[in-house]
């Protein structure tokens, strides 16, 4: 499952990048995070209490930062394990772009789950994962800028296929002809 989002934050890229690398900030912004510690320059250990549908468990999580291009972008790679609930693995590409009002933070994340989590159902897991990602990036954004704005993707333009349009016009013409020919 792929999850995407964008936020406009009235802070510099350097400030946003620093927040994305601060263990205390991350601990406060990750929903259900009980601990978050840096183990080296590009790796963190975390314990997270999560519930997806009827499954509630503590996950031991390892987070690694890869492809780091400060203060522009990086990839977050994570894996979580819980003996009873199963596992989750995922990554998120985070890109920071300077915009007139500050910084645009965009992310694109992928997640795979196994064990009881996979048995819960992909729609439920997908919804919970999207909600958690939105809560994390939203919390981080509003921590830096209380007026941070989530950028909504425009709805795709719905086009009526030409064949349906022609069929509708012909049906209407036939109804008009039938009504007046009686």
Image (cartoon, rainbow, N blue to C red):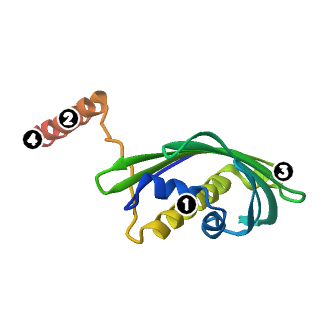
Separation of marks 1 and 2 at Cα, in angstroms: 58 Å
Decide: is 19 above or below 108. below
Looking at the image, tell me whether mark 3 or mark 2 is earlier in sequence order: 3
Disc 1, SS: helix
Q: Which residue is drawn at 25% across and 33% down?
A: 165
> Which numbered disc, 3 or 2, marks the residue closer to the eye?
3
Q: Which mark is residue 169?
A: 2
Q: Mark 1 points at which residue?
A: 19
In the rendered structure, are the residues bearing label 3 and label 1 in contact, judged by CB atoms less than 8 Å apart? no
Q: What is the spatial separation of the Cα atoms under label 4 and label 3, in whole angstroms?
A: 66 Å
Whether pointer 4 and pointer 3 mark residues with C-beta atoms closer than 8 Å, the reply is no
From mark 4 to mark 1, how far is it between C-alphas?
Answer: 72 Å
Disc 3 to disc 1, how far (Cα)?
33 Å
Which residue lies under the disc numbered 4?
A: 180
Query: Label 3, on which residue?
Result: 115
- Can the viewer see residue 97 in this picture? yes
Q: Nearer the viewer, mark 4 or mark 3?
A: 3
């Amino acid at each position: 499952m792929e999850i995407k989002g964008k936020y406009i934050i009235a802070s510099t890229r350097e400030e946003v990048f620093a927040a994305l690398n601060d263990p205390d900030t991350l601990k406060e912004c990750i929903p259900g995070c009980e601990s978050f510690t840096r183990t080296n320059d590009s790796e963190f250990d975390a314990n997270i209490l999560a519930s997806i549908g009827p499954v509630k468990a503590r996950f031991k999580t390892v987070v690694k930062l890869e492809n780091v291009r400060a203060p522009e972008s990086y990839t977050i790679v994570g894996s979580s394990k819980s003996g009873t609930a199963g596992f989750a693995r995922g990554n998120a590409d985070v890109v920071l772009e300077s915009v007139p009002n500050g910084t645009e933070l965009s992310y694109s994340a992928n997640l795979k789950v196994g064990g009881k989590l996979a048995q819960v159902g992909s729609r439920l897991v997908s919804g919970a994962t999207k909600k958690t990602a939105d809560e994390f990036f939203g919390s981080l954004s509003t921590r830096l800028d209380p007026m941070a704005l989530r950028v909504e993707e425009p709805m795709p333009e719905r086009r009526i296929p030409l064949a349906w349009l022609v069929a509708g016009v012909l049906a209407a013409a036939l109804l008009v002809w039938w009504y007046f020919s009686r």
